[in-house]
Amino acid sequence: MSSATDVAYLTRALKMPRARQVASSLADTARDEGWDYTEFLAKVLSEEVASREAHGGENRVKAARFPQTKTLDDFDFTHQRSVSKQQIAHLHQLDFIREAHNVVFLGPPGTGKTHLSISLGVQAARRGYRVAFASATDWVMRLGEAKRAGRLADELERLGRIPLLIVDEVGYIPFDPDAASLFFQLVSSRYEQSSLIVSSNKSFSAWAEIFGDAVAVEAMVDRLVHHSHVHVLKGDSYRLKDKQREVMATTETT
């Protein structure tokens, strides 16, 4: 049996398809450039690891259930000047997840809060972290269903095993009286253990009105922001900007 046949058999047995694809070409490069055996092996294994990470990353992106896939490269910092590109880029290094810190984006509708939240989530998923995305309303609904079924503690424990949860659109719809307690338990269960990204169109001072329980909100916000990166976005809506461009283009052609 030839060496090439051996490699094909062994990489198939070890379920290393990328290594099988590149082994021959890397062997040619190794001979041409004088690599030693260790360097050649490292190159082959690096190709396999990169392939698995890319494949697994896209699976994690799908599992997170983002409404859209957004990245930092897509974000228009020329329109949104109230946040620092350097600070946001630093967040995308994901130290906050390793440190079990939170990220909070506050600001009017359409200023880029959800875009930045998703871009961080996509980056985390592609770097090997499990991520789950939902609106605040959906999270409260899920927790409420778990509570009614008598499995709220189990659900919070399950969510605690996900390194990053993204809670979008806090404040767009007022909650019922139980929501403050449920949301507090979610924040509390993750405190100093795992990370949250929260976006809201309301300042923290307005959250008592949203949740209807000033005491629970105070305790919730205290835990949320203790180890947190808070960014306040300002300015006009991206969506209104795009609509204005459409209107202007239509006007110019009529």
Image (spheres, rainbow, N blue to C red):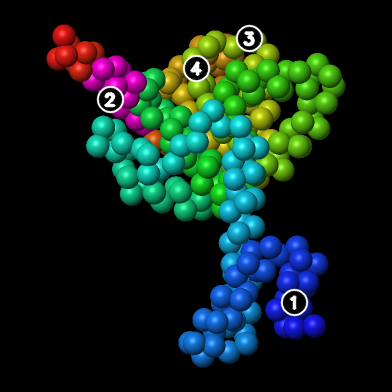
Which amino acid lies under the numbered mark 2 shown in the image of this protein?
A: Gly
Marks 2,4: beta carbons within 8 A: no
Residue depth check, mark 3 versus mark 2: number of the one nearer the observer = 2
Q: What stretch is highlighted in magenta?
A: 232-246
Residue 181: x, y in percent? Answer: 67, 20
Q: Assess disc 2: are there few (<14), some (14-19) or many (≥20) residues with their C-alpha within 10 Å of its C-alpha.
A: some
Residue behind mark 4: 171
Residue 45: x, y in percent? Answer: 64, 71
**First of labels 4, 1 by sequence position:** 1
Residue behind mark 1: 5
**First of labels 2, 1 by sequence position:** 1
Quadrant of the image for the N terminus? bottom right
SS under mark 1: helix
Q: Is residue 50 left or right of residue 160?
A: left
Question: Which quadrant of the view contains residue 235?
Answer: top left
Residue 178's label in the rendered image is none
Residue 235's label in the rendered image is 2
**Residue at x 63% of width, y 43% of height:** 60
Per the picture, the main secondary structure of the magenta-coloured stretch is helix
**Residue at x 62% of width, y 51% of height:** 55
Q: Assess disc 3: are there few (<14), some (14-19) or many (≥20) residues with their C-alpha within 10 Å of its C-alpha.
A: few
Q: How far apart are marks 3 and 1 (CA)?
A: 66 Å
Q: How far apart are marks 2 and 1 (CA)?
A: 63 Å
Residue 176's label in the rendered image is 3
SS under mark 2: loop
Marks 3,1: beta carbons within 8 A: no
Question: Which quadrant of the view contains residue 83?
Answer: top left
Residue depth check, mark 3 versus mark 1: number of the one nearer the observer = 1
SS under mark 4: loop
Residue depth check, mark 2 versus mark 1: number of the one nearer the observer = 1
Q: Is residue 96 visible?
A: no
